[in-house]
């Protein structure tokens, strides 16, 4: 009996999926630092749900129109509707944070619950039930096969969002962490919050379509939280969050391939393992330096 092919021998199988997962990890962990520092963790979960509603709606509309979802016109494409729904949610959250008539947690929780309920209703429609495998990938991120177009879309989104954040880094940081002073100095805080939240929506909608809502939420929250425990300097927090997320994506994907585990869950569980290893390395080298 022939031995099962090794991980390296199966390079042609995991090359594109792993590349997409790695880009999603880098992108989500970077913008996740803002989300964790601003204490709006469940915004990412709510936007993931809203993105999922967009994908589910795309399948439903395509079935009504009698076309294949992946071959539908651009205005019915799952990725476009995922971003549209997430962008609408991001706009609502950003504008609410600028006014705060009721607690932010209440608005985010309401958005999460309504999106979750809407997604269940749409996905249980008789017209969509035949897409069961797509639903599973959407929710849990079993990214074992990626079409070539998804690789390029993920790459373009990653470059665009990171470039915008690097270009507007000082503005985003200033408005995010000292909004009152920014308004005193004449900044339009609501506008900068809106732009920042729309980058969240773009990152989440594209990443959710690529790897699933579970790993996206994990990459948004856990690497940034671990990085904040390991460093007090903001630039180091961003760097550590990206390193932890990238290593977790690679390690989790390898574990998934090696032991036939769910890909999204494997990458999320790998995050605290990698964070612990990074913490141990910093402790060892910190002692040597002292």
Image (spheres, grey):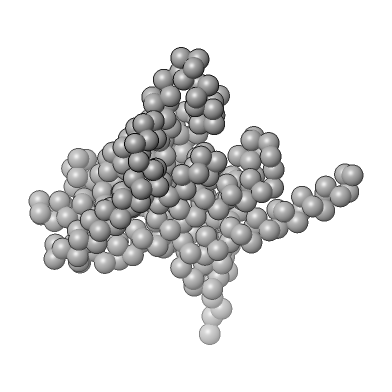
Q: Quadrant of residue 228?
A: top right
In the image: residue 204, left or right of residue 219: left
- Residue ID at (46%, 14%): 186
The image position of residue 224, as x and y in percent, is: 57, 47
Q: Quadrant of the C terminus?
A: top right
- From where the camera sits, is residue 206 visible? no
Residue at 10% across, 51% down: 65
- The residue positioned 49% from the left and 27% from the top of the image is 179
User: Can you say whether 225 is above or below 127 in the image?
Assistant: above
At 60% across and 39% down in the image, what residue appears? 238
For this rendering, which residue is in front, 260 or 194? 194
Q: How many marks?
A: 0
Looking at the image, which is closer to me, 1 or 112? 112
The residue most toward the front is 101
Residue that protrudes farthest toward the top in the picture: 186
Q: Is residue 191 visible?
A: yes
Q: Is residue 233 left or right of residue 9?
A: right
In front of the other: 88 or 213: 88
x, y (%) of residue 88?
28, 38
> Residue 203 at what x, y percent from top left?
42, 42
């Amino acid at each position: 009996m022939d031995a099962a092919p090794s991980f390296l021998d199966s390079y042609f199988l995991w090359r594109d999926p792993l590349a997409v997962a790695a880009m999603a990890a880098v992108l989500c962990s970077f913008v996740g630092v803002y989300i964790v520092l601003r204490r709006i963790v469940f915004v990412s979960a709510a936007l993931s749900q809203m993105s999922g509603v967009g994908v589910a709606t795309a399948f439903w509309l395509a079935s009504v129109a009698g076309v294949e979802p992946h071959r539908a016109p651009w205005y019915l494409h799952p990725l476009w509707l995922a971003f549209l729904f997430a962008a609408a949610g991001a706009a609502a959250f950003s504008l609410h944070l600028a006014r705060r008539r009721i607690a932010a947690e209440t608005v985010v929780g309401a958005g999460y619950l309504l999106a979750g309920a809407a997604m269940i209703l749409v996905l249980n429609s008789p017209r969509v039930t035949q897409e069961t495998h797509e639903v599973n990938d959407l929710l849990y991120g079993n990214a074992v096969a990626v079409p070539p177009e998804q690789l390029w879309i993920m790459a373009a989104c990653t470059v665009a969002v990171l470039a915008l954040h690097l270009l507007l880094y000082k503005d985003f940081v200033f408005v995010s962490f000292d909004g009152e002073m920014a308004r005193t100095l004449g900044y339009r805080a609501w506008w900068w919050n809106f732009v920042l939240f729309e980058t969240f929506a773009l990152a989440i909608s594209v990443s959710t379509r690529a790897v699933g809502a579970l790993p996206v939420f994990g990459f948004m929250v856990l690497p940034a939280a671990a990085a904040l425990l390991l460093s007090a300097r903001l630039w180091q927090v961003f760097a550590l969050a990206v390193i932890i997320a990238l290593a977790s994506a690679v390690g989790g994907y390898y574990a998934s391939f090696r032991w036939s585990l769910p890909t999204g869950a494997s990458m999320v569980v790998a995050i605290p393992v990698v964070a612990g290893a990074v913490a141990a390395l910093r402790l060892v080298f910190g002692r040597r330096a002292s």
